[in-house]
Amino acid sequence: MENSDAPAVMRLSPRDNIAVALRPLKAGEAVVLDGVTLTVERNTAVGHKLAAQPIAAGELILKYSCPIGTATQAIAPGAYVHTHNVESNYLPTYTLPG
Amino acid sequence: MLAGYPRADGRKGIRNVAVVVYLVECAHHVARGIAAGFDDDAVHLIGFPGCYPNAYALDMLEKLCTHPNVGAALLVSLGCEGFDRRRLARVIEASSRPVRTIAIQETGGTTKTIAAGREWIAQALSLLAAQAPVPMRIDELTVGTICGGSDATSGLTANPAMGIAFDLLVGEGATTIFEETGELIGMEHLMAARAANAALGEELKRTVAKAAEYYATLGYASFAPGNADGGLTTIEEKLLGAYAKSGQSTIDGIVKPGIAPPKPGLYLLDVVPDGEVRFGFPNINDNAEIAELIACGSQVILFSTGRGSVVGSAIAPVIKVCANPETYKRMEADMDVDAGRILEGRATLPAVGREIYELVQRVGNGERTKSEALGHREFILTYKSFDPLGPACLPT
């Protein structure tokens, strides 16, 4: 019973440079965030992040207005933001090999 | 209005269970055999696997066996382990609960001990069945909160909704406990600003610094591969979501495992051991933390999950708040609250917060949670070491 008019992505705080998916997003899909259209880079699950604006390598990723890590490479608007392009400023993130 | 079983210490339990307690892994099978023959709503299995003595484990089992939800305890000893079974039995006896210790070596082995244990439990259950619950107020309730199997939706829906429920509970005079200082690294200044006084604020910062050092020594943050699969990129992203569970209330104090908050309000449970890193990870899984929240007097646990944890617990009912709407659709039979509706625009955070608050009261009036009905009675207790609580931790 999803509302098809509901927004697809949301910026949690005005300072944030990422947005979160409110429903599963498909690669190539156009979504509107604060009046700006973003092209979704890859299939994105609910709650996962995409860049809301261009992010430079070394820039802090802001979510809830708070830093959640540092970009390890330049990230284009609409690109998926996760462990491949962001690292923790505290302890490394452990993922299963392969 | 809730319904509680009155205890000699003035507290009330929202359940009335008998616990069968193994005092070393060597007694686990026999203890399980004793409990297995009974309705698992009524008889719960807990215990400690180690053979070497540990003050923390002894204290935890003392607090758990005299928990308000527990009405009777059967201690199952192999007979030669290091656990101080006589002290544990004395503490339970002093709480006016029926208690019995059976040692497998003295009783004559597995079969005879299971038979003797079952006979005692049957008698204890008839005593418990004769007790009637009495009316209980919300301000007689202690509620613990934890998140497990977190994903990127946990911090968007379930955790902030549980924070709203916590604020409502605190407003009604309940006692609430949040935990996992390893997931509060970076939050210490925000927490200190919420402390009841400046000295407590400094203690909150010290507590988080201890956790940061502990995890750095071990080389892993409190972060599982499934967290990343669920869209959480870093420990700091996870903990921002986790912190939302605590709501907005003033933080009234810090407790350690086994210490019950002395008055209503909001408390941080410091789960990270003191001193140099010994015995390994502070809590090896979510149930180790749940056991500690219960040992601090929590009669019910709020558990937020995005990936979809199924666990419950011995002794206290666990209310599962599901953060992710897709997980809810897959695992509805395990979930008590569908907080993912917030992402879909079908409910607001305050509405789900109130729903959780109301469910806490129904569970406090005897309604079974999903994990209870499914027979989840997980329990784990491992080695730890704590110093006494500092004087600034519990402002008067």
Image (cartoon, coloured by chain):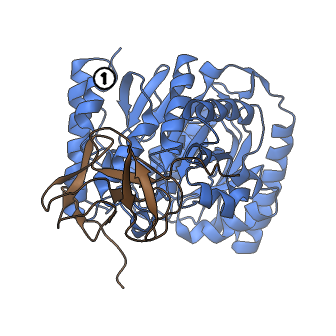
Chain colours: A brown, B blue
Q: Is residue B388 above or below residue B331?
A: above
Residue at (61, 60) in percent of width and height: B326
Kind of residue at disc 1: Ala
Which is more toward the observer, B342 or B162? B342
Q: Is residue A81 in view from this perspective?
A: no
Tell me the residue that label 1 is attached to.
B195
Residue B6 horizontal/vertical position (percent) = 71, 25
Quadrant, the C terminus of chain B: top left
Which is more toward the observer, A42 or A33? A33
Characterize the local packing of mark 1: few (<14), some (14-19) or many (20 or more) Cα atoms within 10 angstroms.
Answer: many
Q: Is residue A43 above or below residue B130?
A: below
Residue B325, by quadrant, is bottom right
Determine whether, in the image, residue B305 is placed left or right of residue B7: left
Determine whether, in the image, residue B42 is placed left or right of residue A75: right
Which is more toward the observer, B272 or B278? B272
Residue A7 horizontal/vertical position (percent) = 51, 48
Q: Chain of mark 1?
A: B
Helix, strand or loop for disc 1: loop
Check the image and name the residue furthest to the left. Answer: A58
Residue at (35, 48) in percent of width and height: B239
Residue at (76, 31) in percent of width and height: B365
